[in-house]
Amino acid sequence: MTPVRVLTVAGSDSGGGAGIQADLKTMMALGTHGMSVITAVTAQNSLGVQGAWELPVEAMRAQYRSVVDDIGVQAVKTGMLASAPLVEAVAELLAGTDAPVVVDPVGVSKHGDSLLAASALDSVRTKLLPVATVATPNLDEVTQLTGLEVTDEAGMRRAADAVLRFGPRWALIKGGHLSGDAVDLLTDGAEEHWLRAPRLDNRHTHGTGCTLASAVAAGLAKGLTVPEAAVAAKEYVTGAIAAGFALGGGIGPVDHAWRQR
């Protein structure tokens, strides 16, 4: 039987904690077949990003067509897209693909390193977000995209409204940078779902954003509704954070295989 197929369009993390490596680990852990279109290569470890090199648009497009035209996809997740030409080319490909799309508008790394050219932000707003089924910005990315500084849950609601104006069907605003419980807001502008989990005392959280977005995509590929997929993804990533482990001299990764331990 053909497995459920999920595609990640994102950058490579040589340290294995985030990017396509985290995406593929998540997809496997959740019982789906993960495939990848690499947009950029980073030299990255637990201490930060030491270098990043984007791939040519034609290399990205060839990977995408190779996978989608032959194997097919039931959901797509996007991550680091690096530049305006890559963002626009990916958006064009997604618009022609009949599958739900989870857009993680990656702007900065866990360590504060920029992963998106400033010139690409407008392309994310006008080209990429309109083709998204779900957009999953964290609060730093909300500020990049909308100019809003979010300091509380009321601010998350305003942020969601601002993100939805760019065109995604749902916004999943990740509130992990606030104090108190780890709370996320999922809304389509009509219904709201507040996803709460206790804040865990573990600094090893590299890859949380990639992991959450990939888990949502895996759920959608399996036929879950957006709220069902988000709830399942939140549960999975909370467990992965709880089991996150030290690696190298800095911030270690979440444990994608925590359910198999």
Image (cartoon, helix red, strand yellow):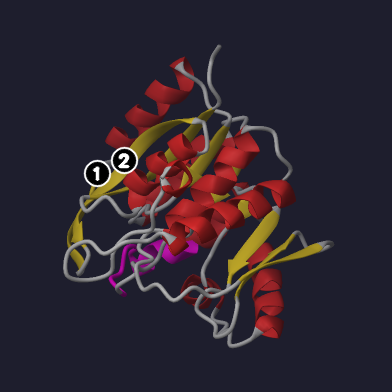
Q: Which residue is mark 1?
A: 55
C-alpha distance separating marks 1 and 2: 8 Å
In this view, 55 is above or below 44: above
Q: Amino acid at mark 2?
A: Ile
Residue sticking out furthest to the right: 190
* Image-based side of 112 in relation to 107, left or right: left
In the foreground, 232 or 99:
232
Task: Answer whether labels 1 and 2 touch (C-beta < 8 Å).
Answer: yes
Q: Bounds of the magenta span?
A: 112-122
Position of the N terminus by quadrant = top right
Position of the C terminus by quadrant = top left
Q: Amino acid at mark 1?
A: Leu
Q: Can residue 240 be seen in the rendering of this structure?
A: yes
Kind of element beneath mark 1: loop
Q: Nearer the viewer, mark 1 or mark 2?
A: 2
Residue 73 screen position, x and y as percent: 53, 27
Residue 125 screen position, x and y as percent: 54, 62
- Density class for disc 1 (Cα within 10 Å; few <14, some 14-19, many ≥20) is some
Q: Residue at x 61, y 34 (%)?
A: 221
Residue 230 screen position, x and y as percent: 65, 53
Kind of element beneath mark 2: strand
